[in-house]
Image: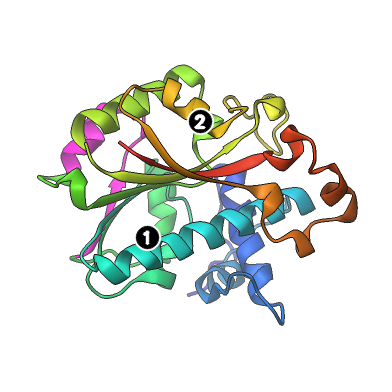
Amino acid sequence: MNMDKMQLEVSETLFIPLVARAAETGRNDPIVADNKAAEIISQIKIGNTITDGGKISTHGILARTKVIDDEMNKILIHKPDTIIINLGAGLDTRICRIDNGRLICYELDLPDVISLRRKFITENERIHFISKSVLHDDWVSDLGEISGENTVIIAEGLLMYFSEQDVRQIFRLLAKHLKGAHMYFDVVHSYFIGKGISSTFLWGLDKAEDIEKICPSIQLIHAWSTGDLMKSRQPLLLRLLNFLPSTKNRSQILHIQI
């Protein structure tokens, strides 16, 4: 497939994690091996699109990818028929890394993003695309009759781009339709609100437990601070500054149950 002349009109943030994973795959000791990401990058002419968020951003992307991949693989060992809902799927390639041949996956994003996604990921009887905004309540109707008890929701690199009001709306919707579901997502420290990379962050949390204040139906199960992860891959100055909560918790991966 030759896509050199492809005109890309989707959000620039779409390509930063893709490029980070592809570049990591080329290392001798990759944290994440993502051959699909490398394949996609080889087929797209990105042009002047911003693809490098910097060392701190790249570290955060790889840390959250590794944590969520590991968590999903653990879940699938015990529940191979798990239903996964991937909010803001973008060009995420996790399905290519964890597919066990039995899981069911719903991948949601805006229509132009899903249109691009279809060029690289094949939709089939287990992998379904939903071309809608996560803020439109009607997207849950595309899930059919599923139980939250056997469902895992992933929202990677997504919620920080919404206002707190929108985040509350998303969680209320999930609580209404998917009670019992587990969810994994990342959140930035509130210090970084208004200090985004190529887009402005609109929402963040000082402490992981503050997530329970967003919606009464949320229970925090576990949290990982980026500053504690992959320390050998963090710049020396960053490691020294990790004693500051805003640096250590610059990004956190949260596991909640609804």
- Would you say residue 245 sits in the magenta stretch? no
Please give left or right for residue 23 compared with residue 121 in the image.
right
Q: Which mark is residue 209?
A: 2
Please give left or right for residue 125 compared with residue 96 in the image.
left
Crowding around mark 1 (Cα neighbors within 10 Å: few <14, some 14 to 19, many 20+) is few
Q: Which mark is residue 118?
A: 1
Q: Residue furthest left?
A: 145
Of 221 and 39, which appears nearest the observer?
221
Residue 118 higher or lower than 86, as above or below:
below
Give the residue type that dot 1 points to: Arg
Of 2 and 26, which appears nearest the observer?
26
Crowding around mark 2 (Cα neighbors within 10 Å: few <14, some 14 to 19, many 20+) is some
Point out the tag, 1 or 2, that comes first from the N-terminus. Answer: 1
Q: Residue at x 59, y 72 (%)?
A: 38
Q: Residue at x 71, y 38 (%)?
A: 197
Q: Residue at x 66, y 51 (%)?
A: 60
Q: Position of residue 87 (x, y in %)?
A: 38, 44
Q: Which SS class for mark 2? A: helix
Range of magenta residues: 126-142
